[in-house]
Amino acid sequence: MHISLTLNSVLDRVDYSSFDGDLGVRRITGVASLEEAKQGDATFVASSKYLDQLNGSFASLAIIPEDLEVTPKAGQLFLRVKNPSIEIAKLCEMISQEMWSKPPAGIHRFADISPTASIHPTATIGAFVTVAAGAEVGPGCVIGSGSYIGVGCKLDENCFLSARVTLERDTVLGARVRLHSGVVLGSDGFGYEFEGGRHRKVPQVGSVQVGDDVEIGANTTVDRGRFGPTRIGEGSKIDNLVQVGHNVTVGKHNILCSQVGIAGSTKLGDYVVMGGRAGASGHLTIGSGAQLSGQCVAFSDLEGGAKYGGAPAVPLVAYQRITVVTRKLPELFKRLNKLEAQLLEAH
C-alpha cells in the first residue's frame, strides 16, 4: 500500500478530544496493525489490553482511547478519541478514496449498450459490460468490467458494481448500492412442483428490489420472486457467499454474515443480525432486532429483540446451557452406568 496523507487532513477528519506527542509528523504513508506498523504508519488501540503492543510499536500516529495512560515516544503522535475503531475507519475511508479513486465518466469502447438503454453522462461503464434494453443507469454509477445489466433494470445514483456482477431482468437498485465481484441478483428462485413422477418447474416472474446504501459481498445470490419482488431493505449489509431465496424480505439495516441461507418467503424485520452459516427455513417471520449466532437455524418464527443459538434455534442462554450439559454427557453416562452396576450388585 502506497499512500500519502497530510497530518492536517487527518486531524480535520478524526474526531479527537486531545493529543500527545510530536506534531512534526507531517505525512501518513500507510495504515497497519500495532505489530506491523512502521515509521509513517497510522494504527489504533482498542483498549488498555494492547498497551504493551503500543509501547513496542513503531507507528508514527496512534489513535487511542481517551483514558489510556501512555506516553508517546519521540516522533510519535497519539490522538485521544472516544471510539478508536470508528476513528481509524474514517482514516481508512480517506485511504480507500485515494486507492480506489472514481474512474472518469464515460462508456468503454468494448461495452455493449442497447440503443434503448439510458446511461447518465456522469456514469462509468467498463469494458465488456452489457446494458440491455430499457435499462437505466443513474448519475455517478460505476459498472465494473464484465458486468451484465439486464432488461429493464434500474440503478439509482452513485451505485458501484465491481467486476462480473449480474443483474437479471427488472432488478432495481436504490442509491449508493455497492455490489462486489460475482454478485448475482434476480436469478430464478428455486421453485418446483412434483407431478407425474417428475419435478415440474414453476416459473419465477418476480424481481429483486434493493434499498439505498445496501452493500452485498462477493458471490452472494439473491433470487427473483415467484410473483412479486424479493426485497433487501435500506442500509443492510450482506457478506460473501450468502443465499437469499425467492420472495424473502430482508428489513432495514440487517447484517447477514458469510454463508447465511434464507429460504423462500421468510421475512426478516429491521436490525436483524445473522452470524456465519446461520439460516432460516421458508415462510417464517424473524422479528426486528433478533440476533442469531453462528450456525443457528430457525425452523419456526422468532420474536424480535432476543438472541438465539443452536439448531433448531432456542434462546441463546438456553443454548449455552445445553452446550455445557452436552459436553458433560460422556462423564454423566459413566457415572450413571456405575450407579446402575452398584444397584444391581445390591439386589
Image (tube, helix red, strand yellow):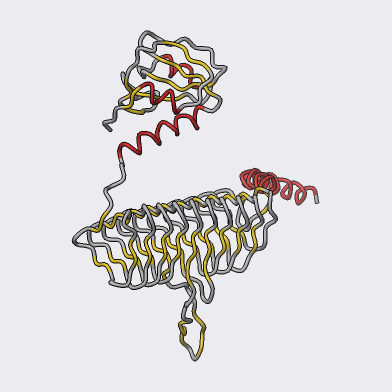
Residue 333 seen: no
Indicate the quadrant containing the N terminus: top left, top right, bottom left or bottom right: top left
Above or below, comparing residue 274 to residue 209 in the picture: above
Farthest-out residue, front: 121
Q: Residue at x 59, y 65 (%)?
A: 266
Residue 109 in percent (x, y) is at: 19, 60
Residue 59 in percent (x, y) is at: 36, 19
Farthest-out residue, bottom: 196
Q: Quadrant of residue 117?
A: bottom left
**Count of labels shown?**
0
Residue 123 in percent (x, y) is at: 32, 55
Front residue of 279/17: it is 17
Q: Which residue is drawn at 45% across and 64% down?
A: 172
Residue 25 in percent (x, y) is at: 35, 15
| 64 to the left or right of 27 | right
| 164 to the left or right of 184 | left
Front residue of 264/93: it is 93
Residue 81 seen: yes
Farthest-out residue, right: 347
Q: Which residue is drawn at 43% across and 62% down?
A: 221
Q: Which residue is drawn at 38% across and 22% down?
A: 8
Front residue of 109/208: it is 109
